[in-house]
Amino acid sequence: MVKPILLIGMMGCGKSTLGRKLARRLGVDFIDTDALVEEREGASVADVFRYEGEERFREAERRVLDEVIAGADEFLRIPMCGASFAVVSTGGGLPTWRDNMPCMNAVGYTVYLRRSPEQIARRLSPYGRRKRPRLQGLDDEQLVAFMRGDM
């Protein structure tokens, strides 16, 4: 069985951007856990976070992770060999909640994308900050401080 590649890293580090490119290059499916949460919940990540709270968002995120790990959706099936394989971009906080990281390590190749807080601040557009609940309203200096854990 072929294992999925699960991309982890700080929010805004480029998991979705790189994941799409990698999946295209490998000729496999790309899965974004944040997009699946939004689809399943019928609301944006920011809205689930804002109106239902972080705990509820993390539970929805875990259900999506379980679904991806189980290969429950047809987009994980490769018709030629029946194997489950994809490049998966995870939400920035997904690996830090409960036993998500050990689950991901057990089923796939977990790849940590590392960028400095300054690099993340440079690459995030105003829209990119607005859609991330914890980054809303932060200027570059505040964003760097937040990423370093100074806020």
Image (cartoon, rainbow, N blue to C red):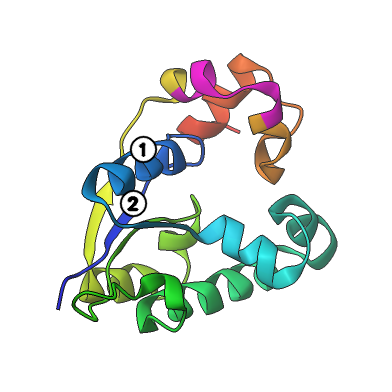
**Marks 2 and 1 close (CB-CB < 8 Å):** yes
Secondary structure of the residue carrying tag 2 is strand
Name the amino acid type tagged 1.
Answer: Leu
Q: Residue at x 22, y 49 (%)?
A: 26
Is residue 93 positioned above or below 114 on the image? below
Q: How many marks?
A: 2
Q: Which residue is mark 2?
A: 7
Decide which of 106, 141 is in the foreground and name it: 106
Which residue matches tag 1? 18
- In depth, the one of 116 and 63 nearer the eye is 63
Q: Residue 52 in the image: x percent, y percent?
A: 80, 67
Q: Residues within 10 Å of mark 1 (few under 14, many from 20)?
A: some
Give residue 3's mark: none
Locate residue 99 relative to residue 55 in the image: left or right: left
Q: Residue at x 70, y 23 (%)?
A: 126
Task: For the C terminus, give its image quadrant.
Answer: top right
- Height in image: 75 above or below 15? below
Which element is circle 1 on? helix
Identified by mark 2, the residue type is Leu
Query: What range is drawn magenta here?
Result: 120-127
Across and down, in percent, residue 84 comes to: 28, 75
In the image, residue 133 sits, relative to residue 96, either above or below, namely: above
